[in-house]
Amino acid sequence: MKNCLIVDDSRVVRKVAGRIIRDLQFNVTEAGDGAEALERCRETMPDAVLLDWNMPVMNGMDFLRALRREENGDKPVVVFCSTENDADHISEAIRTGADEFIMKPFDASIIESKFSEVGLVSAI
Amino acid sequence: MDHSGYNEIADLALRKTGQVFRANHRYLVEARLAPILRRENFSTLDELSDCLKARPNSVLDLEVASALTGKDTQFFRDRKMLSHIARFLSQRAESLNDDGPKLRVLCAGGGTGQEAYSLVIEVMETAPELFENDLLEIVSVDVCKASTLRARAGLYGHFEIQTGLSAQRMLKYFSRTDNSWQAGNALREKVSFSVCNLMTGVPTLGIFDVVLCRNVMPAMARPIAIDVAGQFLDALQPWGQLVLGHEEALPTGISGLEPSRTVRNAFSPIGTGAKRPAGEEFVA
């Protein structure tokens, strides 16, 4: 089973996303900010990261830059998941090394669709 | 419970668009008509039905029947099928004459346009010469006027734009407007959208190399579905492809089509090449 790390300062978002991603057959771990997420990655590098943008301590962009510098940090597929959803923010996230971008609010079909775009789940 | 209003509406749908709604489809009819009921201040289907009866053949008749057609669609619903079509068109293009007709694709029951725009993107990315050399015409028709207008405008909401499209494709081909995302000119200029009722309108559309009619005919009464499939057969080039939905079967009773060897979920005229001449004279 693949591992997905959900990084969001909202417990509710982590819970909702976690439920959806478990249904896609992932083991799910959680972190409340970028710094905590980096610790989780140093323990076990996940296959996928669902990543919020605005968080206390360390935001999503800073986490993403730090992650890509870690050993094996190029491996996880990173899917941003943010309310910052204008074209400029989305391009910036992709340029910085995110593989996909989900604009909040999301539902199960959006997560499944975006996960299939990046090959985390198989498409029809 | 009195079913007369529901039955009248189901009957209207059958007459106008060939769709079948049985007694246990009431929830579906109520859901699809909810926006019209709200707008017209009706609290029940019976009130709507009374109004329709009072003014037979009004604009509302067709609007109700259109609203009852399935709207479930998304970008790149079947990627393999789209790539097969792009490859098929690319191969056909090699046998086109310089001054002959273009390749033509029909999206029948194309709804809000995701299928047509997905095909445009697929062709732009895998067979761009078809557009660069102006060899391909894509026509998308739907019975629903509201869907057709939205398709033509290329406007998609938050959930639609995120289902089936990667962020890269979204940024490349669409731009953000106030509350939605709009297909850019590069996409919109490559598809013509019009209102057309498949029960009667297919012969007016001309001859096609590919007809996509996905998940439309299974909702129709069988005799009507057979008739519509027959019209598609008549509108296909001898080498043409009629593409149905994933795991969708041809209406039982139709003859003249066999499973395609080139495109997934597709059927082609039996006796390829012998059915009739290339048919340039049919092309508008």
Image (tube, rainbow, N blue to C red):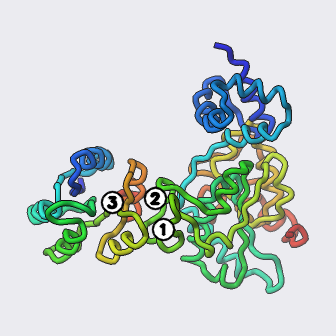
Q: Quadrant of residue B193?
A: bottom right
Mark 2 lies on a secondary structure that is loop
- Residue located at (44% from left, 57% from top): A123
Q: Which mark is residue A18?
A: none
Nearest-to-viewer mark from 1 and 3: 3
Disc 2 marks a residue whose amino acid type is: Gln
Q: Earlier in the sequence, mark 1 or mark 2?
A: 2
Residue B170: which numbered mark, if any? Answer: 1
Q: Which residue is mark 3?
A: A82
**At label 1, which amino acid type do we have?**
Met
Q: The disc numbered 2 marks a residue on which chain?
A: B
Residue A114: percent from the left, percent from the top?
39, 59
Give a yes or no on whether discs 1 and 3 share a subunit. Answer: no
Q: CA–CA distance between discs 3 and 2?
A: 13 Å
Alpha carbon of mark 1 to alpha carbon of mark 2: how far? 8 Å
Q: What amino acid is at disc 3?
A: Ser
Could one spot residue B78 in this view of the protein? no
Residue B135 in view of the camera: yes
Kindly identify the residue that appears in the image at 41 percent across and 63 percent down.
A117
Chain assignment, label 3: A
Q: Is residue B156 left or right of residue B238?
A: left
* Residue under numbered circle 2: B162
